[in-house]
Image: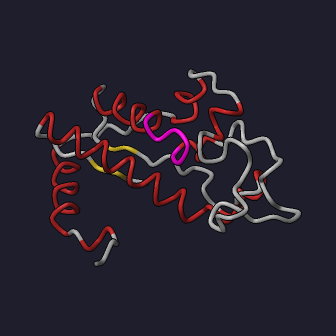
Amino acid sequence: MNRLPWAHPERAAALESLFAQRILILDGAMGTMIQQHALDEQDFRGVRFAGGYDPAAPADHAHGEVCGCMRDQRGNNDLLSLTRPALIAGIHAEYLAAGADLVETNTFNSTSISLADYGLSHLAHELNEAGARLARAACDEAERATGAPRFVVG
């Protein structure tokens, strides 16, 4: 299965058509919305990373100098796509309900370089995929509710 965006020419055509008709509305700042929830360290770690990482789960664990086990994860907004997906989905839904046509993914810092600050470089792919899935699911729900097309743009 091809998951590349240009593999869906009908979606691209619908987006181009809307751009030709009117100005489209992009969602707002994800980080600002997250900050309004005043999350603490445990909120960022969630259940999955509550006690650090599980050494038996290689996908979660990378012991060594760069491991995120003992690092503060507070402020790692992208991690919330894994640990608090309902929160991220809710923020997307708020923007869509307010009239956004386009939503960005919660992946602003989901690069191995940025995640190195948290010792989580090894989660870059998973975070990007989770962020995209949450945004797409929110758009799909908004489309079902309103009949208007909604797009994930980044």
* Residue at horizontal 29 percent and vertical 71 percent from the top: 6
Main secondary-structure element of the magenta-colored stretch: helix
The quadrant in which residue 124 appears is bottom right
Q: Residue furthest front?
A: 56
- In front: 11, or 106? 106
Residue at point 15%, 34% (across, down):
145
The quarter in which the C terminus is drawn is bottom left
Total count of labels: 0
Q: Which residue lies furthest to the right in this view?
A: 65
User: Can you say whether 97 is above or below 150 in the image?
Assistant: above
Which residue, as the protein is rendered here, is positioned at the far left? 147
Membership of 44 in magenta stretch: no
- Indicate left or right for 153 with 112 as reference: left
Residue toward you, 102 or 129: 129
* Residue at x-position 80% and y-position 59%: 67
Colour scheme of the rendered structure = secondary structure
Magenta stretch in the rendered image? 81-86
Of residues 127 and 154, the one nearer the viewer is 127
Is residue 82 magenta-colored?
Answer: yes
Left/right of residue 134 with respect to residue 17 in the rendered view:
right
How far from the left and from the top, in percent, is residue 74?
71, 36
Quarter of the figure with residue 96: top left
Q: In which quarter of the image is the N terminus?
A: bottom left
Res. 31 image quadrant? top right
Residue beneath the point at 63% across and 52% down: 109
Q: Which of 41 and 14 is in front in this view?
A: 41
Task: Say above or below: 125 vs 85.
Answer: below
Residue 132 location in percent, x, y?
41, 55
Counting from the top left corner in percent of width and height, residue 69 is at 78, 51
